[in-house]
Amino acid sequence: MVKESSSEKETNYAETRHDRTKALLSEEAVESLSRKSVLVAGLGGVGSWAAEALARAGVGRLILIDRDIITPSNLNRQLYALESTIGQSKCGIARRRLLDIDSRLRVETYEDMLIAGETAAVLERFAPLDYVVDAIDSLGAKIDLIASSIEQGIPIISSMGTGNRLDPSRLRISDISKTHTDPLARIVRRELRKRNVEHVKVVFSDEPPLTPCGLEKGAIGSVPFVPPAAGFLLASEVISDLIRR
């Protein structure tokens, strides 16, 4: 009797990329996700992991926004940061990686800075959008992106502060009106009220931020496990909302 080789066994089994996902979300849900468009603003320690999870879950179209390049300080937490990618565009690396995960994925990029007062036009440029993931650091642009998304009727989830924290289990999904302990969330909440925005879904940490040492004043410390955990929470909530809708 001739034994089948491991490669022959793999060939004989008609395995597909979403088999394990369909087992939990259903075939109809995965098919629905393939028709969805999600914009991810910011491809750093949070957004890079969110984009990865969205692609692997089966979202059909991703719009990636980030003007930065990989620098050495990114190596401790960002998905695209490798010694071989230092100096390269985050959007460019992300696009190549995501298409290597799924060549049928539609990936569009915007390699420019989001500026307060201009985010509405960017959203319109990439319409139609089913969801926006905000993982940017710029405070003014973050507030404008949230407000503009809500004004255009696009669901959005925003990442609050993940720097200067050590415990990923302290991350929470909540409405911004219920956040606490997070200095960034407090500022964003206050500024959004000025634009008549009281509610938006966020990921925040209830861990009091630490004071970093050995860095210049105002610099933020980070670890390899908190920002990525926030990115996965963002992606999980987006997928859940898209399926429910």
Image (spheres, helix red, strand yellow):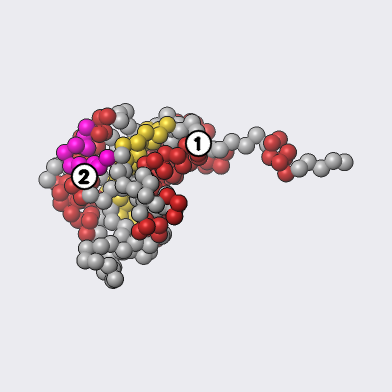
Indicate whether residue 238 is drawn in magenta.
Answer: no
Residue 232 appears anywhere in the view: no
Mark nearer the N terminus (1 vs 2): 1
Give the farthest residue toward the bottom.
Answer: 213
What SS does tag 2 mark? helix
Indicate whether residue 118 is drawn in magenta.
Answer: yes
Residue 35 appears anywhere in the view: yes
Q: Residues within 10 Å of mark 1 (few under 14, many from 20)?
A: some
Residue position marked by numbered label 1 in the rendering: 102
User: Which region of the structure is painted magenta?
Assistant: 112-121
Residue position marked by numbered label 2 in the rendering: 141
Horizontal and vertical percent position of residue 191: 15, 49
Horizontal and vertical percent position of residue 71: 35, 54
Residue in the image at 28% along x and 56% along y: 161
Give the farthest residue toward the left.
Answer: 194
The quarter of the picture where residue 65 lies is: top left
Residue in the image at 62% along x and 37% along y: 15
Residue 116 against residue 227 in the figure, above or below: above
What SS does tag 1 mark? loop
Q: Residues within 10 Å of mark 2 (few under 14, many from 20)?
A: some
Horizontal and vertical percent position of residue 182: 25, 59
Horizontal and vertical percent position of residue 208: 28, 65
